[in-house]
Image (tube, rainbow, N blue to C red):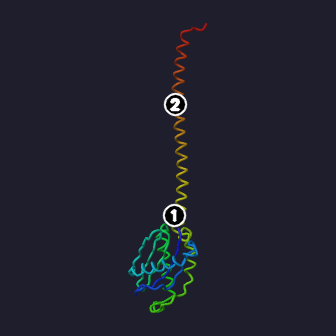
Amino acid sequence: MKLHYIGVIRNETKPAHELCVEMDLSAYSRFTRSSYGDFMSLFAKTVAERTRPGQRQDVEEKSYTFHAYGRTEGIAGIIISDADYPALVAHQLLSKVVDEFLSRYPRTAFTNTTSTLAFPQLKEYLVKYQDPQQADSILKIQRELDETKIVLHKTIESVLERGEKIDSLVEKSDGLSAQSKMFYKQAKQQNSCCVVM
């Protein structure tokens, strides 16, 4: 699971414009990083242009998922992640990023600009949210619950195995008891023919 791109894009006019962006291209070779970066920027702008205000969507392209969140202020938050990155965590991060961006920059600050705006929190979020289970408290609790469930299942299985062993011992003892009664009867019959003097 990996985040590759976090960006805030002005999408009220076409073509869309990246207001602030942070990318992690360390997974790619030096020779292909710029191509991957261009691909991500182009596709993020395309997804942002097609995201209506108030809409959340996930677009899958090969092994990537583009998470988008459009706002009525004329911007969209975009995250590009691996396909197995949890959508819930990505959308929580998008809400957080877009809200913080809008609290820092009023709409007039980005309406007519063609430059990028400084937003250093994106780098922190890109690093922090690489592990979604550490960043998201709900996933962290879910993982702990899953681990507890596994331990409980193992405990229950061992109790059931012990119960089966006890049942087996009870059956064997019942069998031995029946055999010993038969032995006693046969021995009594055998001994009855002989009289002891």
The C terminus appears in which quarter of the rendering? top right
Q: In this view, does 177 lie above or below 12?
A: above
Instruction: Give percent across and percent down for residue 134.
Output: 56, 69
Instruction: Give percent across and percent down for residue 151.
Output: 55, 54
Q: Is residue 72 above or below residue 24?
A: below
Q: Which residue is drawn at 52% across and 18% down?
A: 185
* Mark 2 neighbour class, 10 Å CA radius: few under 14, some 14 to 19, many 20 or more: few
Q: Which residue is drawn at 48% across and 73% down?
A: 90
Q: Residue at x 58, y 78 (%)?
A: 124
Q: Residue at x 56, y 81 (%)?
A: 121
- Residue to which mark 1 is pinned: 142
Residue 174 — which label? 2
Nearer the observer, 146 or 72: 72
Q: Considering the numbered disc 1 on the image, is that residue within a helix, a strand or a loop?
A: helix
The type of residue carrying mark 2 is Asp
Could you tell me how far apart the alpha carbons at marks 1 and 2 are, in whole angstroms?
47 Å
The type of residue carrying mark 1 is Gln
Instruction: Give percent across and percent down for residue 16.
Output: 43, 85
Instruction: Give percent across and percent down for residue 35.
Output: 51, 77
Nearer the observer, 74 or 20: 20
